[in-house]
Every structure is written in structure tokens, then in C-alpha cells.
Image (cartoon, coloured by chain):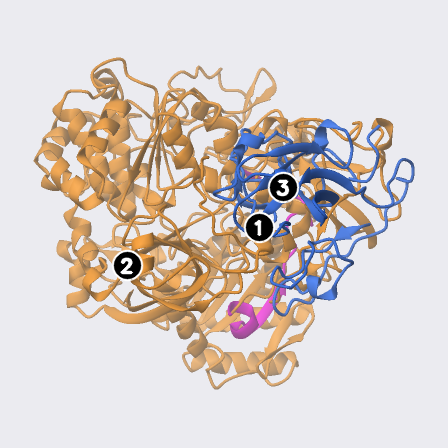
Amino acid sequence: MELPVYVRNDRAPLPPADAKVQATVCAYCIVGCGFKVYTWPVGREGGPGAKDNAFGADFPTGFEGAWVSPNQHTTVLSGGKPHHCVIVADIEAQVVNPGGNHSIRGGTLALKCHNPNGPTQDRLRFPQARIGGRLARISWDTAIEVMAAVSKHVLAKHGEAAWGMKTYSYEFFENTYAISKLAFESIKTPAFAVHDKPSMSNDTAGMDDAGILTFSAAYEDFKSAEVLFLSGTDPYESKTVVFTEWMMRSKATMVFVVPRRTMGVAYAEANGGLFLQIIPGTDALLHMALGRIILENGWEDKEFLQQWVANAWEIDSGFGRGTRNTPWQWRTTWGDIGAADFASYKKWLLAHEPASLAFAAKETGIPKEKILKAAKLLSGAGKAKPKATFLFEKGNYWSNNYLNTASLASLALLCGSGNRPGRMVSRLGGHQRGWMGAAPYPREKSPERLPGRRKVELDLDRWVEKGQVRFLWVIGTTWTGAMTASQELARTVRKLTVENPHQPTSVNKDDIVAALIKRVESGGMVLVDSDLYPVNPLNTELADIVLPAAAWGEHDGSRCNGERRLRLYPKFYDAPGEAEPDWRAIARFAQAMGFSGYHWADGNAVFEEAARFSRGDVLDYYPLVWKANRDGKKGHESLRAMGTTGIQCPVRIEEGKLVGTVRLHDSTLKPADLEGPTTHAKWLTAFNTHSGKALLIKSPWELFADFYARIKPDALKGELWVTCGRINEAWQSGFDDLRKPYMAARWPGNFVEIHPDDAKARGVESGDMVRLTNDDVLIQTGGFNRVEADEIKFSWLEREGHIRIGKGQIEGVAMVTAAVPPGVLFTYFLYPDNPFNALAHRVVDPITNNYRYKLAKAKMIRIGESPYKKDRRFMTFQRRDFSG
Amino acid sequence: MSSFRVPLEESEPGCPGPCNPVDRRAFLFASGATMMSVTLPGLGWAQGQLAKYPRQKVAELGKVKTGEAVEFRYPWDHSNCRMVLVKLGQEGGGGVGPKKDIVAFSSLCPHMGWEIPSKKFYPEVGMAGPCPGHLTTFDLTRHGMVVSGHATQGLPQVVLEVEGENILAVGIFGLLFGFGDNKAKPG
């Protein structure tokens, strides 16, 4: 796509006093700041006098007052007529972003809306089919009938595992409920994965196994904590307001564990904090070394461990976790990593050589004295125990998934954290929490097993690579770019689809169906993609059917933020063309397939049905719907009335009133007697285990060491680590940002941060274009059935020929900065056309079937100057961690 | 609605600064770019509205020293119109003077209106910030572009011109925090 032009305006229309005002929540990151949307017909504007504008404020306004930046205004269609649309943070917000704090992403929400005269005009508007290689407009009916005919054939002849879905997990309860109802209840397919994983396994299994639910904390815990341990994320760069509103307003000492120095780190260091600059992939060693120092010195929280960690009897009698055949049950009882009582965990850790300070310091690259200092900060070093909160995100759990999360959980428990205000363990999150499962994943149908005949959630990408998927419906994800070895995956999908000889040659429905069934029978795959925009290469080059989806603001949706706060995201303008919310596309398809239970009248009907399936879970909002209905209201209406405040899940009823739940595992909470449909799960006041006590899980380095040794860059060959992450000014694949002229001027291309030493050695300066290549991308091709215990290891996969070598390359604009250490490059994680993941290995963590996204390597060469090196209107090469 | 174009190429000989009439080339912001934002005419702001920005002397070439900030108010004598002029000692986008290194910006962060004091304008680095409110930083060599942070607009840049020894403020790129229209007289 062509980048839009950024023109700086020196005025912005003010909403008139009678503009329509609606509360909503930001479309982007996990924090979910409250916003207000003002819409009014084009042709007039508000004025600077308080009585003449919707803010009731005299302009110019003062410090932190109401204000509309030019990038907070757009023009949309509402009821088919042009309307001004202004979207600003809610300055009256009581929660999350009190006073109207916001990020640059949320601050430019208006520019994401479909403006038929603006850069968002290329939204998908009609269903299309690929005919003779090009996309042609078809009707919804034709699209759905083709999909149903091919699906019926695939299911009848090849079975459920040949019919797959790859969808977002977060784009509103209404949509994900419909998606999971179709996939898991009606079709019962095991070939399903969400946008950021190859399988439906848990994200942070080590944490879950310890009995810690990963969104347990409330934002107020980040303010009341005395020490914040931040692993694998700088929330300033990615969950902005949780940092600027909650952490910066706390007195906590921050301990950052990230490979790259960012603004959050600079702030921490300037305020007595600690920066543990870690070599990618070695977090488990750091966690274990910290735990070992604490144990060697007797600094652990003995009282907490006594009261809240399961003892040997509780584990052995099955009250910790029983010996049944579900993943968490076998993991917690498997000798190598399983649960241990305090005494045996201590014995194991003190004897585990990789947990020694010397080994950890060498492998993590963090000086011994800094590790020691961190151990003292976290534990209080025998003096008063500080209120320590442990927070983590993908730099942690997507580099060494199981061992990093298990070892972090154990470290936090040794410090007495997990179940008290200011002393929590929590993920910080990426996207918001919008998954509402209608039925459980059908693990029993998965063709993938681990040693001991343990069924695990199927790795969808590997299953596609093996040619086992004949029909795949992708919804709202780039898929190939978002998964590792991206270019290799795209190559595989290309072979299975557009390079297959069987291609439709007319828009006649029967012709399309006949050609696609022939394709299926020849071993090919039929690909459907639902999305907002043209996406390279997924729907521009590969998909057979492309469906237009309605976006944020174009239909009523609901979901939760990182402290489980549920709110309504209302429709405030028209979706383009025939675009529809995905739940409606699912309903159309399910009806064509002959499935019952999909006749929803509107989004509220899905929301209310889904509520019943939330009962007893963390995001339980059934009491809200139950009470609304009793009061003669709809669920959505009840939620709408709660505005930007919403309510924290699980929702409960006390004395006839709805109450939210501030935090989970809250040992200080005294819930009232059960009332109405309220449920009190054990994890409300205790940990999420049978005994309510947490488990110390072992994390032996040997389970990862062979893979880690294989993927380490070889400096003698000129190889460097490449890792990736988020930056404030971009969201996911940049699908909105590159259409926001302001943001596109800031980041017109991908960037690569390079240490000055590495840059000098390669003749690279800031602003040069560099190419990163990896001709040694490891791709797992088999290993669906493992039998013996050692078959879980990477070395077994390699020995048995289940690994092939692929290639990947990306380009970016060099930013030479000492923010990254020598030998480590950092780049954006999902810049379209240059996705970092092209360089990363497609070998799953065998314990959880999750990728080790953050661990790639590459050689780097300079390929010339970027236009931005000298043109001062684009990009900047200043340090992002500049602190004055 | 008035829109300021982006500056001319800095390399162009005799470019006096980014205040020339709109030049089509200025809209070719990205290579191959063809789209531009559509703006709609404003109504109802007629009273107290400037037709164009005043030309206001803000400093003298010979008196501006590298590292010494000059504070002034523009285009109105209003607390939201606090501006900082600095001589960077290195070329800056839109810069004037023999070395094109004299630039001026609003000192109110266009995130939430916190003041970035003039001592937080660092000529040798070419940056302003971090903003004391939420840590946003700005690149003074690149038209006040956000380096890292939350402002939904770069730091508004004062368009400067040189007339003999005098440095004049003649316009503003971007909307000043708190204003609906820079050219509307504060009440």
C-alpha cells in the first residue's frame, strides 16, 4: 500500500453542544483506556465558548483540560450521511485512565475509522472470490454456499481434523463465542489455533501449573507495590497507561529484566531501580539463581510458604494436582518438572547446577552483583518483606515458554507474592481479553500426543505443513507473518492454494465448488480469510474467498481489559459496504451447514447466550445479564450504562447489587454469602489448585539446553541475536498505523536497533537500510506421536529427521544505539512485509506447543541509505531511552 | 481549514524556511504517496479570527547562542502560547540562520498540556523532554516529531524567518495544546 501524506493542521473541529456522545474503550492494547466519541452531521462545528461546545469548556483550555488534537478528528458515515467524528480520552474517567490519560495509539483512534475519502478507504467492503488468480466480487450467499459445500465434503471425506480455523482470540466476546461454538461444538475440530500461537495450549503453562491465574492483579496493585519485577516487557512501550498512570505514580522500586534499554528502564534507573539486561532466552536461569540466593540466605517468606504452598501430603494425595490425563495434571506430576513441596524444591534448586550464580551470570550476561542486589530487593534480605509484585509478558514467556513461567512462579512464591494486595503475580497482557469459549477444545480428537499417550492441542501450522488441512478459515490475523518461519509458511500455503492446478475460472457457484473440491482431492487446501483490509500475502495473493468484517465502532461488542474490566464498545458509525461482524458471518455459515443454535437477532443475543458459558470462569459476567433481564433490560444496555467504568469480572451479586472483583487469589477478600447466580470459585480467595495452595514447579534447564545450544548465534560467522517487541507508536501489524498519516510519518518502515560496535563492524549508520538473513531457520515437520520420555527433547526431533532447514530475510532502517547490547539486534515484531518472525525458528516448546518467537539469529548487511536518513519529515534516530 | 504544508527540502538553495506558499512537492511526502487528508471548511469561528499569523520579532541572529533558550509567546499573549527558541548547533528541520540551526517550538506537550521547561530543550542532543507528565520526548531536528511517547501530534513548531538581523515568528505547524484554532483569539 502507499503511505498517506501527513499534513499538520493548526485547528481541529470542536463538537457542538448537541453532538452525540458515546462512551467507549480503546481498540488497542490490554489497558483499555476509556474514551468518548462525539459525532455530529457535517456542516457545522462547535465554538470556543463553554456553551458552544460539547465539553462545556472555554477554549483555550488549560493543563489536562479537554482538547481535540487534529489527529483526533475524522469524517465517517452514520446512517449513510457524513458526520464529524472526534474521539478523545474520557477526562471524567474514574478507572484505568483517570483524568483522560492515553497513549499515542488510543489518542489517534479517530484515524482508524473508515473514512471513504481518507487513507482507510481501502477497507474490504464486499465478499470476493479468487477467479483466475484475481479477486472478484460475489454475494454473501454465494460465498457462504461455496464454503459450506466444500466444508461438507471435507468433513465427510477427510474428517474434522482436515477442517481448520485460525482466528483472533480477542476481538470481542460476541465474535469469539460464535467462532468457538462453530469450531468446538458444531464441527468439533482439533485443527484450531488463535492468532498468536500454533495451538490452543495455554499461554503461560508454568504459571498455570503453579496455581496462579495470569490476569489476577488489579492496576491498583501496581501502585501499592513496593517492588515491581518486570520481566520481558517495558509497559511504557506497550501498555502505556498502566505505566504512566499506575506504576509511575507508585513509590515502587522497579526491577526490569529485558534485553533492551527503553524509556521505562531509563525511568526506573533514574528512580533507584535496577536494569538486568538479559541475553535472550536465559530468563529461567536468572529466576532460579535469584531463588537460590534467597534460599541460601534464608530470605524466603517462611510464613507465606507454610500457609500457602502445598506440602508433600497435599501433593501426593492428589489435592495439589491429581494424576489424570490432562496437560496440567501430567505436567505437575511428571518427575522432571513436577510439583515439589518446599523442602524438596529447595533441595532440588540448591543441587541444580544451572541455578548457580556463576552459571546464571555467565549465561544471562548480567553481572553477579546485580543479581545479588535484585535478590535483596525482592526478598527484603532478611529484613522487612517488601510488597513485591511480579509482572511479565512475552519477552519472558515467548522465549522459553514453560521453564520461564514455571521458574518465575516459583521465585515469586518464595518471595511471598501471589495473593495479597500489592503482592501479586500477573501477566501485563498484549491485546485485550475478548475470548469467550462456547465449548472446550476437543483434545480427544487431536492427532498429536506426547510421551505417555498424552493428547495435546494440535500444532496447526505443522499440520498444514504436513498437508493435512484441506479447508482453513482465517479470521482477523495475518497468520503467516504472525507465525514463525513466516516466509516458509507462506511458501507452503502458496503451494497448497494458488499453485494447485485446480482454480475456479468463473463466479458461477457450482464452478467454484467443483474446482475447489478437486483441489481438496488433489491434496491442496481451500483458504478463506475474513479481515478488515487487504493483507499481504494472505488475502491479496492466497485466499480463495475473502470476507469483509465490521470493525471496532461498527457494531456493539464487549470484552475485558488487563484487570478483567468488562465494558461495551458500541457502534457509532456505519461499517463499509457489506462488511459484517464476524459473529454474523459465522451464523450464516453455520446455518448453511445445517447446525442449530445460530439464529441470533443481534449482538446482544450472542452476548447474553455467551454469558451462560462464562459461569464459574474468571470472566464470569452472567450475573450482569441475569440481573439486567430481571430488571427488564438487555445485557448490552446494562453494560452501556456503566460507561467507561464497566465492571471487573468475575461479576458477583451482593445484597441485590452487582459487584466486581478487584483481584483474584485475594486472601484478604471476604465474599458475602452466595446470592442469585453468583459463584465463588476457589481461586477467588486462594490459588487455583485442588488444595487452594500454590505449587512450586521445577524447571530443569536440560529440557531447553539442547535447543538453546543449537540456535545460539555464532559470532565467528557474523551471526547476531535478533529479538523483537512492541513500540508505543504501532499496534500489531500496523494495519491502522500505516493508514494514519501521522503515525506513518513516524514509522514509514521497519527499524533495526544495532549496538554501535556491531554497526561499526558492518559499516552501518543510523538511517541506512540493512538486510537481516537467516539461512538456518529450524522448522519442525513431524513428531506428532511421541512415545518414550526422551522424545520430548529437541535432539530427538533432529535425530529422527523431524527438522528441516528453511530461510528467512527481512529489511529495516538501522538505528544505531547503545540501548541494545553488543551481539543483539532488536526490531518491531510484526511490521508488514518485513515480519521479524521470518527469521525465527518454527520449533515448538515441546511441553506446551508454543513458539520461542523471541529467539532468532541473523547476519546483517548494509544495502544502502534509506530515504529517511536525510529527510527530516520521516522517522527519527534519536534514542528512545533519552532521559535528559 | 488552513493546513500548513511540510517544509521544503532542506537542501534546496535559498529556502528561507517552511513558510512559502503551498508547494505541490511538499505534499509528496512519501515516495509514491498520492493520498492526502480531506479537510472540511470550518464555520462559526469568525469572531476574533486572524486571517493570517502575525509577523513577530522574537530574537536577533547575533544574540542567539547555542544552548541558551529564548522564551516568548506567540501568536497570542496567552499562557498556552509559551514558545522556546533554541540554537541547536546542528541543522534542524525548518531551521533558520546561516547554519539552519535556529528552531522554535511550543513548550506545552501536545499530549495533555504539561509544560516542558526550556531547560529540558537539549540543543546538543537535538531533543526536548522527557515531558515531566508522561515522559514523551521530541526530536528538535525533525520538526518536533515524537521520539517516544504519547503526544498525538509533534511538538508544534514555530515557523521562523530571518529579516536582516531579526528572527521573526510567522506561523505555526500544528495545533497548540488547548486551542481549537491557533488563529482564534483567546477569550
Chain identifier, orange in the render:
A
Q: Residues within 10 Å of mark 2 (few under 14, many from 20)?
A: many
Left or right of residue A42: residue A810:
left
Q: CA distance from mark 3 to mark 2?
A: 50 Å
Find the magenta span and give its range.
A537-560
Q: Quarter of the image holding residue A585?
A: bottom right
| In front: label 1 or label 3 | 3
- Which element is circle 1 on? loop
Q: Is residue A509 visible?
A: yes
| In front: label 2 or label 1 | 1
Question: As shown in the figure, which amino acid type bears the numbered disc 1?
Answer: Gly
Residues beneath discs 3 and 2 located on the same chain: no
Rendered residue at 68%/73% (across/down): A138
Which label is found at residue B62? Answer: 3
Q: CA distance from mark 2 to mark 1?
A: 34 Å
Which label is found at residue A720? Answer: 2
Mark 2 chain: A
